[in-house]
Amino acid sequence: MEELKPCAANSPPLTPLSFLERAAAVYGDCTSIVYGTNTVYTWRETNLRCLRVASSLSSIGIGKSNTPAMYELQFAVPMSGAILNNINTRLDARTVSLLLRHCESKLLFVDDVSSRELAVEAIATMTAPPILVFIADKEEERGADVAGHANKFSYTYDELIERGDPGFKWIRPESEWDPVVFNYTSGTTSAPLTQRSDRTEKSGLLMDSTDISC
């Protein structure tokens, strides 16, 4: 037993992304998420949307509330090989900017009307700001309106889905030690001292919640 070495038969790298893949295969026609009055996706549709976003993230060099986009990004970002960092929108712009610089985010997803001003202000002083992606909430009034900041956003979330490949072969972890999320505690209000991994790119997500968590 002491000479038993890890191999594909006894040590496959486990990842929560496998649950989505299995759900799409076994429960493909079952409802995955219901949001508002008009938005309903099955597990098959959710998997395809995540694959499309992961494909788009990979193609551009990236190796809030419980909206469908936020739900999907918990899968799609690590599927692209990147690391997701959920950021609390109740933080001020200075702190958000500090966190983005510290984790070296390459791309920032922004949802919610109020988050747009925060995101634009947070990256204003950054020498290497992340790419901004706007998440339009079709269930909210003015949810799809980016007036005043259209030139600040490189993509919309729907554009990433449209340009993505539903047949994208998502990037599996090489080991269980590979990170999929990078979180700051809710008490992080000054220069953070946490250690981070430099192995993959990082994407930020401005979300409307009380804690910074996965």
Image (cartoon, rainbow, N blue to C red):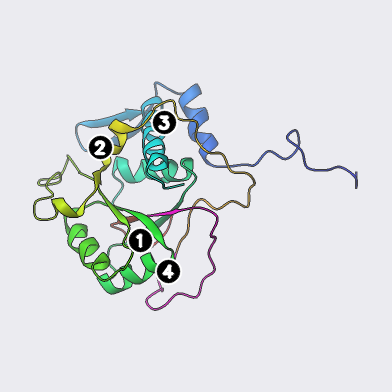
Task: Residue 47: give its label.
Answer: 3
Question: Mark 4 or 1 closer to N-term?
Answer: 1
Q: Which residue is mark 1?
A: 87
What residue span does the magenta drawing correspond to? 184-203
Q: Amino acid at mark 1?
A: Ile
Is 41 on the left-hand or right-hand side of 150? right
Observer able to see residue 176: yes
Q: Nearer the viewer, mark 2 or mark 1?
A: 2
Q: Which residue is mark 4?
A: 102
Query: Which residue corresponds to the image point at 23% horizontal and 67% vertical from the top-left?
Result: 124
Q: Against 62, is 50 above or below? A: above
Q: Nearer the viewer, residue 158 or 155?
A: 155
Query: Which residue corresponds to the image point at 40% horizontal and 25% vertical from the top-left?
Result: 44
- Element type at marker 3? helix
Task: Residue 158: give its label.
Answer: 2
Assign the N terminus to one quadrant of the image. top right
